[in-house]
Image (cartoon, helix red, strand yellow):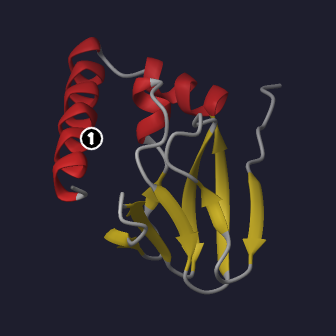
Amino acid sequence: MKEQRIMDRKVVPSETVLFREGQEGDVAYLLQAGEVEIYKDLPDGTERRIGVITEGGIFGEMALIDNQPRMANARTLDSCTLVLINRMMFEERLHKLDPFTRGLLNMLVRNLREMSNRVAT
């Protein structure tokens, strides 16, 4: 019989910082309910919003794709229900893709990181 994996589900209160820019990414998130803000801290101490993740969205995956530190911060805007996708589970799925698709994902992540850095300055 094949072993069934159960993903962790977590309810997080409003205004909870889930991760910060520069941290190692060991988990991605699937947002089942609520909203999460993705933002960058600017040198002058202010914040710049990059986007808002809504129900059904996935975030935090870029650090798992390219093994680079988090490129931004993530904070809940209200109470959120999250499904946590750990690195091992994510990599298992990623390795099932053909090499072309994996390469394309890496290129897209690199481009997104570059664009995000330009927007935040």
Q: Which residue is mark 1?
A: 113
Position of 56 compared to 76: left or right? left
> Above or below — where is 3 with respect to 117?
above
Where is residue 24? Give x, y as percent: 59, 34
In the shown orientation, is residue 105 left or right of residue 81? left
| Percent coordinates x, y for residue 40 in the rendering | 39, 60
Give the residue at x 48% y 42%.
Answer: 70
Q: Residue furthest top?
A: 99
User: Crowding at label 1, few (<14), some or many (≥20) Cα neighbours within 10 Å?
Assistant: some
The residue positioned 22% from the left and 44% from the top of the image is 112
Quadrant assignment for the N terminus: top right
Horizontal side of residue 75 vs 68, given as left or right: right
Label 1 secondary element: helix
- The answer to whether residue 51 of the structure is visible from this angle is no
Residue 60 rendering spot, x and y as whole percentages? 49, 48
The location of residue 49, given as percent across then percent down, is 33, 72
Q: Nearer the viewer, residue 7 or 4?
A: 7
User: Is the residue 64 above or below the residue 58 in the image?
Assistant: above
Label 1 is placed on what type of residue? Arg
Q: Tell me where residue 113 sits by quadrant.
A: top left
